[in-house]
């Protein structure tokens, strides 16, 4: 049913919550797992100095975050392809889905509500609303 599964990550606890589910699905269906970290350099383009340093640090963070996913997948015997891309997160995720024939996306969500969600936006919500493939959302565990 699924042969290519994407788990976008930003290294947050919310995205980490989705990784276990994505690996389990990939293992169950014999699918290749893809992990994607998107660096949104445009968000830092207004910095007069140091924007390049920030983008370099985010790319390094992306390699670390996707590396953790790849290591976990390898431990479960699941093939994994890791990518760090640049662009707007939800658009880059949609483009990746199209370019790699992804069958399913597994994403974490912070579970924000009301004004917080409105002000901060939600990459997961935008992907859910615009995706042509199923999107499984996994809510971040509530530590309260």
Image (spheres, grey):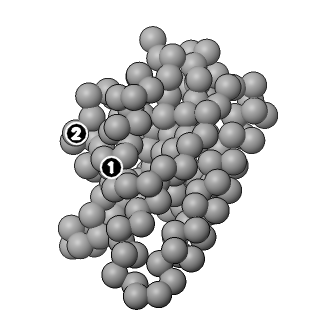
Q: Which residue is mark 2?
A: 130
Indicate whether 128 appears above or below 120: above
Tell whether 127 sits left or right of 44: left
At numbered mark 2, what does the secondary structure look like: helix, strand or loop? Answer: helix
* Viewer-side residue, 54 vs 25: 54
Name the residue: 64% across, 54% down.
63
Name the residue: 37% across, 75% down.
45
Q: Which residue is mark 1?
A: 90
Indicate whether 138 appears above or below 30: below
* Viewer-side residue, 60 vs 15: 60
* Viewer-side residue, 102 vs 59: 59
Name the residue: 34% across, 56% down.
88
Where residue 57 sits in the image (x, y, percent)?
Answer: 60, 70
Q: Are marks 2 and 1 in contact (CB under 8 Å)?
A: yes
Where residue 48 sits in the image (x, y, percent)?
Answer: 40, 88
Residue 117 seen anywhere in this rendered image of the structure: yes
Tell whether 49 sits left or right of 27: left
Pointer 1 local density, CA inside 10 Å: few below 14, some 14–19, many at least 20: many
Name the residue: 38% across, 43% down.
93
The image's mark for residue 62 is none
In which quadrant is the N terminus drawn?
top left
* Viewer-side residue, 19 vs 47: 47
Where residue 83 sits in the image (x, y, percent)?
Answer: 56, 43
């Amino acid at each position: 049913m699924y042969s290519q599964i994407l788990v976008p990550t930003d290294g947050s606890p919310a995205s980490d919550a989705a990784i276990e589910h994505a690996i389990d699905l990939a293992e169950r269906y014999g699918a290749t797992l893809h992990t994607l970290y998107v660096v949104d350099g445009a968000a830092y383009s207004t910095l007069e100095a140091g924007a390049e340093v920030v983008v370099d640090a985010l790319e390094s963070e992306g390699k670390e975050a996707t590396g953790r996913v790849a290591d976990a997948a390898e431990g479960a015997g699941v093939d994994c392809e890791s990518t760090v891309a640049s662009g707007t997160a939800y658009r880059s995720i949609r483009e990746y889905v199209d370019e790699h024939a992804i069958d399913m996306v597994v994403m974490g969500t912070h579970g924000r509500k009301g004004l917080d969600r409105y002000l901060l936006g939600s990459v997961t919500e935008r992907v859910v609303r615009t995706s042509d493939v199923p999107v499984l959302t996994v809510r971040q565990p509530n530590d309260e």
